[in-house]
Image (tube, rainbow, N blue to C red):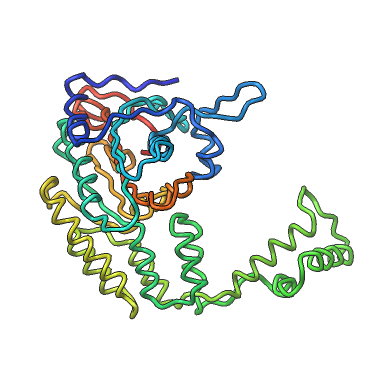
């Protein structure tokens, strides 16, 4: 396993200091984490990035890929409604075909509070702490990128779409291929799926499979591969039904594309969102008003000229459902942020949290990336770690 080089002790202490002095309690997490739980949260594609461990006859586990889920589980098990915890330790992810370290250090903080109430102050606090910790590594080329997963939902609602279509767009927001496919399926284009799929759409799965098998027999077709007629017919039916479902107009699809492409200073980004919004924009306006408060609070920690806003930021991280942010270094590059974080209220319920434990926001800093002498810095070594 490739190890990340150590960061000088005094630099690590400086990076750790803002989190350690925040009033949060020190926490740790088991080195082994339940594999199935992490795959449920992150998707089966994550399996290739994990180091899987299994005792004979036992359940599969993996070396912890990060701390967020593990700390959240510890908080839930403690039975407390509120709590804040900072941590420092090794995380493990398999590198994909390069020489990046597979074991690396993370320092972070997770903050939990009861459901209800405003979240803006806590959001600004956690993003500010991440900025301070990242800046303590000595780099002067940092920028703070902000986003908000919930803004996409508010924007979609402003367009006054059919409920099923709006729900489908929100569901695929974090899956770019499916989102762009949905945006290409507009009312101005002919429906996809073909005549056969359209005929099958009106039948039960058993009837559709029998009809497809009859067509193959009449045509003298011998199916090749593992899929039978029922499975193929079911896929064709789903495709036909999707093609016949309500679709965006060309103008609505273009508005969504433009919204996802926003990348500017917060003031210009918010003005652009308001201009693109549809007639039912009350929720979007309220969400943007909350962002004005966050920015006011953040001004005490991060310089305004280093802040950018892009609403699409963080959609790749499935458990984020509100604020998202990254601290980036020009030298290290946008694909390897120095710090990341965001709000993940919904994760607590998915982990079995009781009603009332509904607010969660956190951040993680990679000290090796933050250190001016570390990754891609003076005297630096090969890049570290994978996804965030």
Residue 12 is situated, as x and y percent measured from the top left of the image, at 21, 24
Residue 59 falls left or right of residue 111: right
Note whether 375 is above or below 166 in the view shown.
above
Give the residue drawn at x 49%, y 74%. 163
Residue 317 falls left or right of residue 194: left
Quarter of the rendering containing residue 8: top left
Q: Nearer the viewer, residue 98 or 353?
A: 353
Residue 57 is situated, as x and y percent measured from the top left of the image, at 67, 24
Note whether 114 is above or below 192 in the view shown.
above
Give the residue drawn at x 22%, y 60%. 291
Give the residue drawn at x 20%, y 35%. 23
Residue 105 is situated, as x and y percent measured from the top left of the image, at 33, 26
| Quadrant in the picture for the N terminus | top left
Q: How many marks?
A: 0
| Quadrant in the picture for the C terminus | top left
Note whether 97 is above or below 212 in the view shown.
above
State whether residue 341 appears in this view. no
Q: Nearer the viewer, residue 257 or 222?
A: 257
Give the residue drawn at x 85%, y 59%. 221
Residue 351 falls left or right of residue 327: right
Note whether 318 is above or below 180 in the view shown.
above
Quarter of the rendering containing residue 383: top left
State whether residue 67 appears in this view. yes
Residue 113 is situated, as x and y percent measured from the top left of the image, at 31, 48
Q: Nearer the viewer, residue 219 or 89?
A: 89
């Amino acid at each position: 396993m490739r190890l990340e080089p150590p960061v000088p002790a005094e630099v690590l202490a400086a990076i750790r200091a803002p989190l350690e002095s925040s009033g949060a309690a020190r926490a740790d997490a088991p080195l082994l984490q339940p594999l199935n739980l992490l795959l449920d949260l992150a998707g089966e594609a994550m399996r290739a990035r994990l180091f899987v461990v299994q005792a004979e006859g036992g359940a599969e586990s993996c070396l912890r890929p990060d701390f967020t889920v593990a700390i959240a589980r510890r908080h839930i098990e403690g039975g407390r409604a509120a709590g804040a915890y900072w941590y420092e330790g090794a995380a493990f992810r398999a590198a994909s075909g390069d020489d990046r370290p597979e074991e690396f250090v993370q320092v972070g903080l997770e903050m939990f509070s009861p459901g209800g109430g405003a979240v803006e102050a806590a959001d600004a606090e956690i993003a500010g702490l991440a900025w301070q910790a990242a800046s303590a590594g000595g780099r002067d080329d940092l920028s703070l990128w902000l986003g908000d997963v919930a803004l996409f939902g508010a924007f979609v609602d402003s367009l006054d779409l059919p409920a099923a279509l709006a729900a489908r767009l929100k569901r695929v927001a974090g899956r770019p291929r499916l989102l762009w496919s949905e945006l290409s399926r507009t009312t101005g284009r002919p429906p996809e799926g073909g005549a056969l799929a359209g005929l099958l759409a009106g039948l039960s799965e058993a009837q559709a499979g029998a009809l497809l098998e009859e067509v193959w027999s009449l045509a003298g077709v011998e199916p090749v591969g593992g899929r039978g007629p029922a499975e193929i017919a079911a896929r064709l039916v789903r495709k036909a039904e999707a093609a016949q479902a309500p679709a965006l107009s060309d103008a609505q699809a273009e508005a969504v594309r433009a919204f996802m492409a926003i990348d500017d200073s917060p003031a210009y980004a918010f003005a652009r969102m308001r201009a693109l919004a549809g007639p039912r924009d009350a929720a979007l306006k309220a969400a943007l008003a909350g962002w004005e408060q966050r920015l006011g609070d953040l001004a005490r920690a991060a310089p305004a000229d280093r802040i950018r806003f892009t609403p699409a930021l963080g959609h790749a991280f499935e458990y984020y459902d509100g604020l998202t942010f990254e601290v980036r270094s020009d030298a290290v590059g946008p694909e390897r942020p120095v710090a990341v974080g965001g709000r993940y209220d919904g994760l607590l319920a998915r982990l079995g949290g009781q009603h009332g434990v509904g607010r969660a926001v956190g951040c993680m800093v990679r000290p090796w990336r933050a250190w001016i002498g570390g990754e891609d810095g003076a005297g630096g070594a090969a890049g570290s770690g994978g996804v965030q």
